[in-house]
Image (cartoon, grey):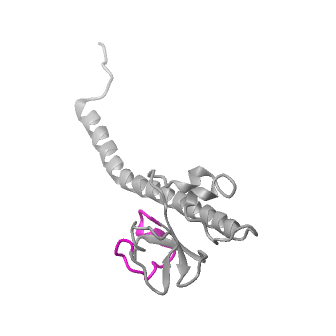
Amino acid sequence: MKIKSGFTIAEVLIVIAIIAILTTLILPSMNDIRKKNRDTERISDITNIQLGLSLYSGQATSTQGYPLTLQELVPKYTTADSLVSPDGTQYTYIPLKRAGSPKCVYYHLGTTLELTSAQIDAADTFSSAPGSISNGYSYCDVGYSGPGLVAGTKNFNVHP
C-alpha cells in the first residue's frame, strides 16, 4: 500500500488564517515605527538647521542677523538635504525682527510631526492668519505673504 503524505486543504487554510491574523496585528505597529523614524529625521534636520542659523548669525560679517532664506546656509553651514523633510517639503522658516530694528534677531522654524507623541516643544502663540504676526515682531522680508506662525498641536517650533 502507498501512503500519501501532504497537507489537507483544512490545514493549509488554518495556516493562511494564522498568517493573516499575525499580519493584521503587526502592520499598524510597523506604520507607527515608520512615522516615528520620519519624525526623528525631521527633528534631526531642524537641529542641524538651527545650528547652521546660529553659526550664520554669529559671523562677524553678518550684518542682518539671521538669513532671509534657509538656502543661504548651504553649503557652508548645512547640507541641502537637511532643508527638505522626509516627505519632500521645505521646512517652514520665517526670520523676524523687533519693531524698529533692521536686523533679523529671531526666527520661527517649524515642521509638522506625524505623531502627537513626538511633540517636543509648545507651539508659538503667534497668529495663524497668513502673513500676520504679533508680539512686537515683524517679518524681515517686507514682501512676505506666506503662512503666518501657526499655533497648532503638531507644529514643532525652534527659536532662540
Answer with the quarter of the image where residue 143 lies: bottom left
Tell me residue 112's x, y (percent). 43, 65
> In screen coordinates, is 76 left or right of 144?
right
> In screen coordinates, is 135 left or right of 28?
right
Is residue 11 visible in this depiction of the protein?
Answer: yes
> In screen coordinates, is 151 left or right of 62?
left
Tell me residue 46's x, y (percent). 56, 64
| Image quarter in which the N terminus is found | top left
Residue 81 belongs to magenta span: no
Main secondary-structure element of the magenta-colored stretch: loop
Question: As drawn, which residue projects farthest toward the left?
Answer: 10
Q: Which residue sits at x=68%, y=65%?
A: 56
Tell me residue 22's x, y (percent). 35, 48
Q: Which residue sits at x=36%, y=76%?
A: 128
Is residue 159 visible in this depiction of the protein?
Answer: no
Q: Is residue 132 above or below residue 37?
A: below
| Image quarter in which the C terminus is found | bottom right
Per the rendered image, the range of residues in magenta is 111-131
